[in-house]
Image (cartoon, helix red, strand yellow):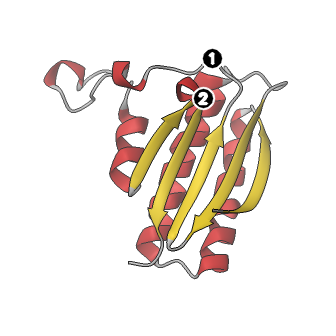
Amino acid sequence: MKHLTVIKLSSKLKSINQVEPFARELRQKYNLDEEVFHNILISLTEAVNNAIIHGNRIDESKEVILQTFLEKDKLTVCVKDEGPGFEVTKVPDPCRKENIEKPGGRGVLIMKSLSDDIRFKNNGSCVELIFNIRK
């Protein structure tokens, strides 16, 4: 696995604005098609948003770190925060009738739907989003 890029974001809501330029860099570097680019952009936006709000509790002294790795045709983007993590199995399923009106769980569902694979590490304080970049 080849380590490629690392960027560090402050845990303030404005940092989410840095996700799109980062995703556009990946698009250009790997000549990503529209669908893969948008899946990465939306998934990363969700992951960074969750890391800032839920992981680091918008504590500007903490960072969110984005790292990319390439192995063959799979691009992995790891989003790490400095929070305590969470138990992914306890995230409510937003598709279930009793959760339709509740705000939680949608980000995880979106990331699972748009990535080709997803892994939660370090008690959920690290999310690895895997994308097949050559379909």
Q: What secondary structure is marked by label 2? A: loop
Quarter where residue 125 is shown: top right
Q: Residue at x 36, y 18 (%)?
A: 90
- Image quarter of the C terminus: bottom left
Quarter where residue 9 is shown: top right
Return the residue nearer the eye: 6 or 25. 6
Cα separation, mark 1 vs mark 2, equals 7 Å
Q: Residue at x 62, y 43 (%)?
A: 79
- Image quarter of the N terminus: bottom right
In the rendered image, which residue does mark 1 sit on? 84
Q: What secondary structure is marked by label 1? A: loop
Q: Residue at x 58, y 23 (%)?
A: 54
Among all residues in the image, which is located at the extreme bottom?
Answer: 31
Return the residue nearer the eye: 2 or 102. 2
Name the amino acid, label 2: Ser
Among all residues in the image, which is located at the extreme right?
Answer: 61
Looking at the image, residue 24 lies above or below residue 110: below
In the rendered image, which residue does mark 2 sit on? 125
Relative image position of residue 108 (x, y in whole percent): 41, 37
Question: How many other residues sit within 10 Å of disc 1, few (<14), some (14-19) or many (≥20)?
Answer: few
| Marks 1 and 2 in Cβ contact (< 8 Å) | yes
Return the residue nearer the eye: 44 or 69. 69
Q: Residue at x 66, y 58 (%)?
A: 68
Number of numbered callouts drawn: 2
Question: How many other residues sit within 10 Å of disc 2, few (<14), some (14-19) or many (≥20)?
Answer: many
Name the amino acid, label 1: Pro
Return the residue nearer the eye: 112 or 96. 112
